[in-house]
Each structure stands twice: as C-alpha cells, then as structure tokens.
C-alpha cells in the first residue's frame, strides 16, 4: 500500500516530513523517499512508487495507488499536453500530486470515487495532506482531538459521513476533485477547488435492451480485467512473479472473475485461487470444483497457531493500518494475505460485486425511500439511537450540529442521488477499510468497481440483474442471476454446472462486510461463533474492554459496558458487533489519541 504525505507552506525542518512518511511504512520491504524546497515538502512510502521528474526538473509527479494502463511519469506527460484536464480521461484508484515548480503551482487530486484514501488539514500558514491520518498527526502543530460529530456517525454507520473523520479538523479529501495551490511566495496560502468528475456522468446514455446487455456484458468485463492484469504491480513477488491471485468462493461474483481471468491470463502467467476454510466445508468443495474446471492452482487456508499466538498484534495492526476504520473482526484478512502475498500479487477480489451487479439499482431506491427519514432524525432521536443501539455514551451527541445528517437526508430525494450516496459512503468507506487492510499486503484488483462497468450496469435493464439469492435451492439462486451467468457462459459454461450451495442460510448473502462471502462467512463463524478462534477473539475483546484504561473513558456507557463484560462469553450477535466496535475504537484511541 503506497502512501503519500505533503506540507504546503512553512513546514519547518526536513526531519518532520521524514517522520510523517515513516509512520505509513507498514512493511520492511516498503521504500521511503522525501523531497523538499522552500515552499513544499513531500514524502512517499511504497515498494516502487517514488518521485518522478521531467527532463528539465520543472515538473514533479507523485502517485499513491495506481492509474490503470499507465506507467510511471504518465501523469506528467498528460499534464504537459492537457493540464489537469487529463484526470477525466484516466482510470484507477489513486491520489496524485503534480508540482509545477516553474509556475509555482501544486495540484492535488483524487480518483473519481475517492477510493484511495486521502486526508487533509488546514493550519494558519500551511496545508497538510496524507494518505493516512496518522501521518498528519505526526506534525507537532496538529492537535490530537476526537471529533464528536465524526464519532457519532461512526457509532451509527461504522464510518464518519462525508468529509468527516474521527479527528477534529482533519477532513477526508472529496472524490473527483482538484485542489490547486499557488505556492509562490505570498503572505497567505491561496487554494482553489474544483470538481473534474460528477456522479451524474455515470447516468448519461440511454438504456440498452436485455439482449444487448447479455451479449455485451462479457466483452465489457473482459476489457476491464485485461487492463487490470496489465497494470503494473507495486509489491515484491519473489515466488509468485508470474501468478495472478483470485479470492475464490462458490458464488457468482468470484466465478465471473475466475472465468474471465482464465481467458485473459496466458503463459507465462498462472492463476492461483485462494479459499478460506476447511477442506470439508461445502463452499470449499465447490470452490475446488471451479478451480479444477479452469485448471488453476487452488489453495485452502485455515487459521493456524501463528494467528493464535499473535492475535493481539493482528488486532492492533488492523486498527493502525486503517486509521481505525476497519473493525478488528476483519483482522483475519491481514493474516491471510500476509501469508500469501508472495504468491497472489496482484489479487483479484469481488468487493462490491453483489451491490453493483444485483443491488445498485434497487438499493438506490431503498436508500431514497427508507434512509431519508432516518438521516433526518432530530438531535435527540439520533442520540437515543446511539444509546439504544450500542455502548457509546449519550454525551457524545450533546451540543452536536446535525447539519451533516440533514444534508445527506436531502440528497436522498432521488434515485440518482441515492446511488451517489451508496457509492460515496457505503462502498467507498465500508469496503474501503477492508481494501486498505488487504492492500497493505497485496495489490488488489477490483473489476466490479470500475467506471465503465458501473456505467454499463446503470444502463442495463433491472430485470436481468435480479437475484434469487433468498431461495434455499442453490439452482434457483443461479437462475436469478441472469447477467452474471451470461458473463460466465461467455467464458466457460462448465462453471455454471457447479451450484452455489454454501451450506449455510441464504441470509448470509445479505452480509455487507467488504469480503467475498466465503471469507466473511468462514472468518465470521470462526471469529464470532463458538469455535476456538471465536473464543480467542472474544477473550481478546473482553481483555481490552475490562482494562482500566478503557473504563476511564467518557465515550462509553460504562454501566452497560460493565454489565456486558460480566456476561462474557454469552454475547448475542448484536452485542458482539457493538462490543467489537468499541474495542476497535478503544485501540484507536490508544494508538492515535493517548
């Protein structure tokens, strides 16, 4: 996971930018580099991304993430040709800095959806930005103070809304936007902001017919996967140099990716599929059949003693890497991909597949119909909801401005705006936390969250995107996924012969935890259920909650929390979800605030 940091204005000594950059170095194989002149200080940590200059040393490029289909220095070439207008023509998950040294201008921009995290804060004589909040907090003048508004939203939604974060005066960089700085010597910092992309552009174009959708879907997906395979990776691959990884479940989302990759991957590249669970699990059995059909290597991964022995370290690292936005119940992701990063780089994952293919259109309608009332709740009702739903204190909502909820509530009045909310908040924030954790170990490829694919889906008739996933008959569930089936048939119809019988209640298909269902189902059962690993995680959470450091906080409903601790290990699912969130936030407080 590459990270960038910058200070525009009076930044002090060069040592401070190095310290800020080092805070984002999550693995020993990450490199670290810095740059500074009298006006700007910049830093980057990653495996290979670094500063790129033009021949005359008058332009500097710095990229966090990837711009698909483009190599290093591509942004500089495009900038020289078109200025910052080039952003509307490129795709990827990135935050980019273009420093025009000759003109005294610095441009900071995010990708269309803001999937690559970027944060900023403004001080009296300087502007500070970074891929991770922890880097900004390393600057001595930045105060470490919890933002009560962001915390209230975190308590309800699992993440702060809009530009809010858990830290006061630190904001999340908006998606599809450019910040332009005039860094010439002046008495004050001059900043201009403008949008280069808006969600409504996804809605341009007429609806296509059912026949066209089914015929073209496979071609569109193939083009996307091909571009992702050919994108340059940024992580070392000493053992899996010529391998492409796939997280493989028995569901349609991952087999769409598997079948497409099989057709696009040619020698010397090989496919390596990874499924989490035991060999006897029904989903693992189904995944094995799928892998055998396409002739790829298949790995089955279960938790080992190394996870048992280092569980607390995995929990703390999960929180540290993701700035507290990834719940510690996802720590299994860190464990899995740390073990397999040498063999699965890059790694394709089906994040967002269900929402994009089978839920984007009706989910938007659901948001516009049901969420507006909730988001427009008055101050007292909002505070009551937080008190009722979890273990956070009612005090965190007092004297808090409710305008953010009002703003989002007003945005849900139309289907299109509700879809925008879904992409910018639900998928970008919730999935983004898990993606960030996974990306600390491997280069993640996300074909479903692609501009061309989203635009195609929004033009496709809703009738063929319908899913029968609620049916207990696995073959009935297959019949309801016409669009996904058409892509699989386009690649290899044999993959349709393996049913999606996962051996668990179909209600699991509704889980929106940012993982392929096989991963989340297995990890959740092992870490949340009654297994040894679940007991181990619950014990770890209990230990965090009962420590005096936790019980001195005023952020929690201590009476309710102490009662829950006494009831250990007999927590129901709702209690467990909230208690793991409290433990996640408590670890974050210790790492970022104390």
Image (spheres, helix red, strand yellow):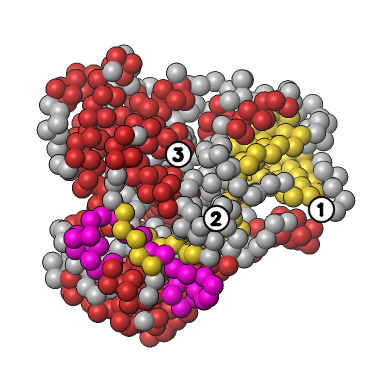
Which residue is denoted by mark 1 in the rendering? 54
**350 sits to left or right of 383:** right
Q: Secondary structure at mark 2?
A: loop
Q: Which of the pair 277/396 is nearer the observer?
A: 277
Tell which of 169 and 469 is nearer to you.
Answer: 469
Q: Are marks 3 and 2 in contact (CB under 8 Å)?
A: no
- Residue 458: tell me if it is visible: no
> Is residue 332 visible in the rendered structure shown here?
yes
Using residue 216 as the reference point, say whether residue 329 is left or right of it.
left
Sequence-first disc among 3 and 2: 2
- Residue under label 3: 322
Mark 2, residues whose alpha carbon is within 10 Å: few (<14), some, or many (≥20)? Answer: few
Q: Which residues are magenta?
A: 260-287
Asked if residue 310 is among those painted magenta in the image, a careful observer would answer no
- Inter-mark Cα distance, 1 to 2: 31 Å
Q: Is label 1 in contact with label 2 (beta carbons under 8 Å)? A: no
């Amino acid at each position: 996971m590459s990270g960038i940091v910058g200070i525009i204005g009076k930044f002090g000594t060069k040592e401070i930018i190095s310290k800020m950059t080092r805070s984002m170095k999550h693995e020993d194989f990450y490199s670290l580099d810095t740059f500074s002149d009298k006006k700007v200080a910049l830093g980057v940590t990653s495996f290979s991304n670094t500063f790129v200059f033009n021949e005359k040393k008058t332009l500097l490029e710095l990229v966090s993430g990837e711009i698909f289909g483009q190599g290093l220095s591509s942004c500089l070439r495009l900038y020289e040709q078109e200025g910052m207008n080039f952003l509307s023509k490129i795709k990827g998950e990135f935050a980019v800095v273009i420093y025009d040294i000759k003109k005294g201008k610095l441009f900071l921009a995010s990708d269309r959806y803001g999937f690559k995290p970027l944060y900023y804060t403004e001080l009296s004589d300087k502007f500070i930005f970074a891929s991770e909040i922890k880097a900004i907090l390393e600057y001595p003048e930045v105060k470490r103070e919890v933002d009560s508004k962001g915390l209230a939203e975190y308590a309800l939604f699992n993440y702060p809304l809009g530009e809010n974060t858990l830290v006061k005066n630190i904001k999340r960089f908006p998606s599809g936007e450019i910040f332009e700085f005039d860094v010439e010597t002046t008495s004050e910092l001059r900043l201009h902001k403008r949008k280069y992309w808006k969600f409504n552009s996804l809605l341009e174009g007429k609806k296509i017919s059912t026949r066209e959708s089914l015929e073209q879907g496979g071609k569109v997906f193939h083009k996307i996967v091909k571009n992702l395979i050919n994108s340059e990776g940024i992580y070392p691959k000493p053992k899996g140099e010529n391998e492409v990884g796939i997280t493989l479940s028995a569901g349609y989302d991952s087999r769409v990716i598997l079948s497409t990759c099989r057709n696009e991957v040619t020698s010397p590249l090989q496919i390596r599929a990874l499924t989490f669970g035991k060999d006897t699990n029904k989903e693992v059995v189904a995944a094995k059949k799928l892998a055998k059909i396409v002739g790829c290597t298949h790995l089955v991964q279960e938790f080992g003693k190394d996870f048992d022995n280092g569980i607390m370290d995995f929990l703390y690292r999960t929180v540290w890497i993701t700035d507290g936005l990834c719940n510690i119940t996802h720590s299994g992701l860190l464990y899995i991909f740390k073990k397999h990063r040498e063999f699965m780089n890059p790694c394709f994952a089906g994040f967002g597949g269900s929402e994009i293919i089978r839920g984007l259109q009706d989910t938007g309608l659901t948001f516009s119909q049901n969420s507006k009332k909730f988001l427009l709740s008055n101050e007292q009702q909002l505070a009551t909801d937080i008190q009722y739903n979890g273990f956070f204190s009612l005090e965190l909502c007092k004297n808090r401005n409710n305008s953010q909820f009002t703003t989002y509530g007003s945005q849900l009045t139309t289907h299109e705006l509700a879809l925008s909310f879904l992409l910018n908040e639900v998928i970008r924030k919730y999935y983004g936390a898990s993606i960030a954790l996974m990306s600390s170990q491997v280069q993640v490829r996300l074909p479903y969250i692609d501009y061309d694919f989203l635009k195609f889906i929004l033009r496709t008739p809703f009738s063929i995107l319908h899913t029968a996933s609620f049916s207990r008959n696995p073959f009935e569930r297959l019949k309801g996924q016409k669009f996904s089936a058409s892509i699989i048939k386009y690649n290899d119809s044999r993959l349709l012969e393996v049913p999606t019988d996962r051996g668990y209640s179909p209600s699991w298909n509704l889980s929106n935890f940012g993982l392929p269902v096989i991963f989340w189902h297995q990890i959740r059962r092992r870490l949340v259920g009654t297994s040894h690993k679940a007991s181990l995680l619950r014990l770890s959470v209990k230990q965090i909650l009962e420590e005096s450091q936790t019980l001195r906080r005023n952020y929690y409903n201590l009476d309710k929390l102490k009662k829950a601790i006494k009831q250990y290990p007999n927590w129901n699912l709702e209690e467990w979800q909230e208690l793991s969130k409290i433990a996640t936030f408590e670890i974050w407080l210790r790492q970022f605030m104390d």
